[in-house]
Amino acid sequence: MENNCLNCTNVRKVVIIGCGFVGSACAFSLMQSGLFSEMVLIDSDIAKAEGEAMDISHGVPFAKPMKIYAGDYDDIKNASLVIITAGANQKEGETRLDLVKKNISIFKSIIPEIKKRKFNGILLIVANPVDILTTVALKLSGFPKNRVLGSGTVLDTARLKYELGKHLNVDSRSVHAFIIGEHGDSEIPAWSSVNISGVPLDKFCEMRGFCGDHQETMKKIAEDVKNSAYEIISKKKATYYGVAMAVKRICEAIIRDEKSILPISSVMNGEYGIEGISLSMPAIVGKDGFETHVPIQLDEQEIIALKNSAMTLKNILDQNEI
């Protein structure tokens, strides 16, 4: 693993490629965060990037000093982070995996341009299907594994924490839980490791008086989490605020070298017998990007589901030439 990828870059500079709903929301979130002093927006529609840069810049007097501008691939070279949100949008009735061919094609035009600029920072993939596109970006770029990661199930995990917090009537920040596997229909809630400030979920539910329908309630919460993007898309045509906050959280862990444990998407190296595909799993994230996976407690059924999730992604990837 390279351990100096941020040392030869401007650690306060970020580039966002793609200025659609997600890219623009990410830019707005990062402007308010104070993490960066320079942000470049790149889009195939230059006027769109310029408009977003102008609009977001007008909020700088209410935040921290920051230079925000529309740029091109030459502006990538000394950035510490390049965030790729560019890709076809998920439409109503469409799964994330339905986007594969369109977005692999888009990545085949974007990644070589990044590679040409001798970029030495971290590549954060946000476009969907994020697990497959993280693998694609890794292969096309040739970058070390630690420097290519996806937003993974950071948002799904936040949705799970939110729903559990609401159900149990506790602060969702006190809920410790992960969604693992695919950021999509085969995702798995890792119920075996869920706890509320150290108290196992089952025991905490008993404390709150939830006994009789516990399993059914947990099943419904998992379904609600999995289907929440579909519901949002059906109501407002796109989902972008939640993922923008997830991207901000990942950037915080990298720029501050927090060594935070987040369920990002990164390539598997034989864990649970899975390799050659990126999956969303708890991992330590710091200034060098992905550091190591963190083994969490999983029961036999969860491990089987995780392997099935990996197989689903691998089969889709194998059908598409990179």
Image: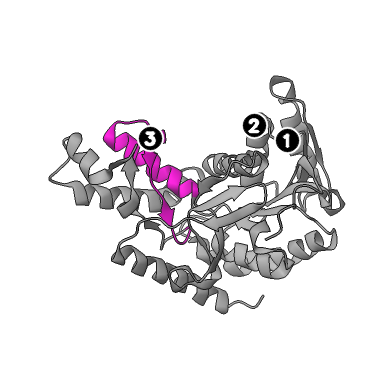
* Picture residue at 41% right of the left edge, 59% below the top: 187
Amino acid type indicated by mark 2: Ser
Instruction: Identify the residue position indicated by label 2 in the image.
Output: 33
Instruction: Identify the residue position indicated by label 3 in the image.
Output: 174
Secondary element type, mark 1: loop
Q: Residue furthest top?
A: 62
Tell me which colouring the rendered structure shows: one colour
Instruction: Identify the residue position indicated by label 1 in the image.
Output: 36
Graded by Cα atoms within 10 Å as few (under 14), some (14 to 19) or many (20 or more), the crowding at tag 3 reads: few
Q: Are marks 1 and 2 in contact (CB under 8 Å)?
A: yes
Foreground of the two, 136 or 191 = 191
User: Which contiguous range is marked in magenta?
Assistant: 154-183
Q: CA distance from mark 2 to mark 3?
A: 22 Å
* Picture residue at 68% right of the left edge, 57% below the top: 147
Secondary element type, mark 2: helix
Label ID, residue 77: none
Q: CA distance from mark 3 to mark 1?
A: 28 Å
Foreground of the two, 316 or 88 = 316
First reached walking from the N terminus: tag 2 or tag 3: 2
Is 184 situated left or right of 250 in this image? left
Pinpoint residue 161: horizontal percent, then vertical percent.
Answer: 39, 41
| Front label number (3 vs 1) | 3
Amino acid type indicated by mark 3: Ser
